[in-house]
């Protein structure tokens, strides 16, 4: 299986690098500056699961006379339109497209662009960042990747990729209900990002405050209600685990969105909280806490853009 990974940043760099370690045929589609860095320094991964520096294959764009078997899109949601344009030359009639983006709003655009039968559902759970030197730094013990046919069918291509991911010692999770898996993460991530960004604090710091437990519990309930209205209510076990994780005393956990805010960077606000707010409105659900968090982050984005001009 010839795999193209769009981007060698946090998500693409980590999962792609782990596949490269096993000898998998992986090529990274990157910007010229990143290509130069990778050619000079290799792909550097820093992780409790093993530090490694890997020589990797890179391309920087253009056309291709041979399509890849799989194209993995591992970019920020706000770069999706550019990502689609970049990978079009490398996607053929039989290319499988696997997105590892947050949220679910991207699925319709990808299916419209590449054909419904070519697009898998996918999500991942990992704490990851890229250091100023370009190293991919793993921040926790999570390295799971969930993927499957949006129809719920079992397929040969899902099995083939699953075997590759397992050889890379990743927590590979082929799924026959990947839409539900994506909604589950959507619920969790919206709560985590909304709470930590609105309060500009970690879960542990929020829990130190009077009303902190109630605040997170209510925001999580709003997300569950919206998912249920869409037909994807998370099961009781998932909700219990998520509530426990998001109300853990002294937890240092934050969201990647808060890390983006603290660094003055662009956020996936509209794709995550904005999409949840739009779905709440369509379902007639008030969701006041999610709306407040979304408003707060829109103010941040307005100020950031004004500073950039």
Image (cartoon, rainbow, N blue to C red):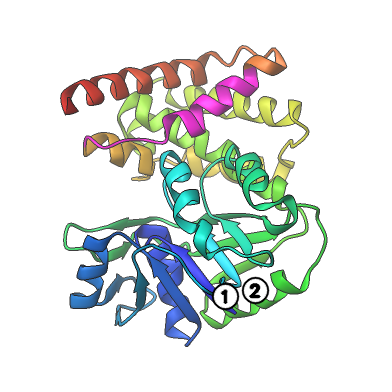
Q: Position of residue 246 (x, y in %)?
A: 49, 39
Are the residues tagged 2 and 1 within 8 Å (C-beta)? yes
Query: Looking at the image, which is closer to me, 199 or 256?
Result: 256
Q: Residue at x 46, y 36 (%)?
A: 192
Q: Quadrant of residue 145?
A: bottom right
Q: Quadrant of residue 225?
A: top right
Q: Residue at x 49, y 58 (%)?
A: 87
Q: Which mark is residue 162?
A: 2
User: Could you tell me if residue 73 is visible in this image?
Assistant: no
The outermost residue toward the bottom is 23
Query: Looking at the image, which is closer to me, 122 or 212?
Result: 122
Disc 1 crowd rating (10 Å Cα; few below 14, some 14-19, many 20+) is: many
Q: Position of residue 73 (x, y in %)?
A: 50, 56
Q: Main secondary structure of the magenta part?
A: helix
Position of residue 14 relative to residue 283, above or below, is: below
Position of residue 271 relative to residue 149, above or below, is: above
Tally the numbered discs.
Answer: 2
Q: Position of residue 293 (x, y in %)?
A: 43, 21
Q: Residue at x 31, y 24 (%)?
A: 301
Kind of element beneath mark 1:
helix
Please report the bounds of the magenta region as a residue range.
264-280
Query: Looking at the image, which is closer to me, 57 or 17?
Result: 57
Would you say 145 lies left or right of 258 here? right
Would you say 306 lies left or right of 230 here? left
Q: Which mark is residue 165?
A: 1
Q: Residue at x 41, y 43 (%)?
A: 79
Instruction: Specify the quadrant that holds the N terminus.
Output: bottom right
Q: Position of residue 2 (x, y in %)?
A: 55, 78
Q: State how far apart marks 2 and 1 are (Cα).
A: 5 Å
Position of residue 195 relative to residue 89, above or below, is: above
């Amino acid at each position: 299986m010839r795999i193209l990974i769009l981007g060698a940043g946090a998500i693409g760099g980590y999962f792609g690098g782990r596949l490269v370690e096993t000898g998998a045929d992986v090529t990274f589609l990157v910007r010229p500056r990143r290509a130069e860095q990778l050619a000079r320094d290799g792909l550097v991964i820093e992780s409790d699961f093993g530090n490694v520096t890997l020589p990797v294959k890179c391309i920087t764009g253009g056309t291709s006379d041979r399509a890849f078997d799989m194209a993995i899109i591992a970019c920020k949601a706000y770069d999706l339109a550019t990502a689609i344009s970049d990978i079009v030359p490398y996607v053929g009639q039989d290319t499988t497209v696997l997105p590892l983006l947050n949220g679910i709003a991207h699925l319709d655009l990808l299916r419209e662009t590449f054909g419904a039968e070519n697009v898998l559902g996918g999500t991942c759970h990992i704490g990851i960042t890229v250091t100023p030197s370009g190293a991919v730094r793993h921040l926790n013990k999570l390295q799971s990747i969930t993927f499957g046919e949006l129809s719920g069918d079992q397929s040969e291509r899902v099995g083939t990729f699953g075997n590759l991911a397992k050889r890379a010692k990743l927590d590979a999770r082929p799924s026959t209900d990947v839409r539900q898996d994506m909604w589950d993460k959507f619920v969790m991530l919206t709560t985590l990002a909304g709470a930590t960004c609105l309060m500009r604090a970690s879960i542990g710091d929020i829990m130190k405050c009077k009303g902190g437990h109630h605040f997170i519990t209510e925001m999580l309930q709003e997300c569950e209600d919206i998912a249920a209205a869409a037909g994807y209510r998370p099961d009781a076990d998932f909700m219990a685990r998520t509530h426990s994780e998001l109300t853990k005393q002294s937890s240092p956990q934050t969201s990647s969105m808060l890390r983006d805010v603290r660094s003055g960077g662009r956020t996936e606000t509209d794709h995550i909280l904005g999409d949840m707010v739009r779905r709440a409105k369509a379902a007639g659900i008030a969701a006041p806490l999610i709306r407040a968090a979304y408003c707060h982050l829109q103010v941040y984005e307005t100020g950031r853009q004004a500073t950039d001009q």
